[in-house]
Image: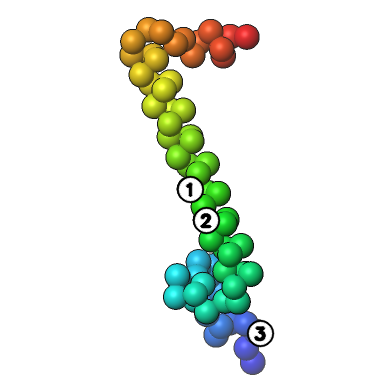
Amino acid sequence: MSAPGIDRSPRQFSLPDISSVTELPKPLKALVYLAMLALLTVAGVGALLATVVIIGQLTGSFDVAMFIGR
């Protein structure tokens, strides 16, 4: 007697590779590329804002503590 599911391998989540995206129909491929572009844009804007804050802190022209204290 064995319990059900003992010999099964665990399911793992993995992201599809780019070759599987190219096999999608054009509307779905466009949505995938649009989502990737949106994520890259958000990451780029976040990195730019972080750079502005760090440079502002180092030069003394921007005080983060003032905004946190409000």
The C terminus: image quadrant: top right
In this rendered view, identify the residue nearer to me: 5 or 52: 52
Q: Name the residue: 55% across, 85% down.
A: 7
Nearer to the camera, 12 or 68: 68
Q: Residue at x 48, y 36 (%)?
A: 45
Question: Could you tell me which secondary element the residue under label 3 belongs to?
Answer: loop
Name the mark nearer the viewer: 2 or 3: 2
Residue 12: percent from left, percent from top = 53, 70
Residue 34, image quadrant: bottom right
Q: Earlier in the sequence, mark 2 or mark 3?
A: 3
Kindly identify which residue carries mark 2. Answer: 36
| Residue hosting label 3 | 4
Disc 1 to disc 2, how far (Cα)? Answer: 6 Å
Q: Are marks 1 and 2 in contact (CB under 8 Å)?
A: yes
Colour mode? rainbow
Say what amino acid the circle numbered 2 marks: Met
- Answer few, some or many: residues within 10 Å of disc 2's Cα (few below 14, many 20 plus, some between 14 and 19): few
Q: Position of residue 20 (x, y in %)?
A: 49, 76
Gap in angstroms between the C-alphas marked 1 and 3: 43 Å
Circle 3 packing at 10 Å, graded few (<14), some (14-19), many (20+), is: few
Mark 1 or 3, which is nearer the eye? 1
The amino acid sitting under disc 3 is Pro
Label for residue 40?
Answer: 1
**Callouts 2 and 3 close, C-beta under 8 Å:** no
**Considering only vertical position in the picture, is 54 above or below 32?**
above
Q: x, y (%) of residue 61?
A: 41, 8
Neighbor class of circle 1 (other Cα within 10 Å; few <14, some 14-19, many 20+) is few
Q: Depth check: 23 or 47 in front? A: 23
Q: Residue at x 39, y 14 (%)?
A: 57
Residue 46 vertical position relative to residue 30 in the rendered view, above or below: above
CA–CA distance between discs 2 and 3?
39 Å
Q: Amino acid at mark 1?
A: Leu
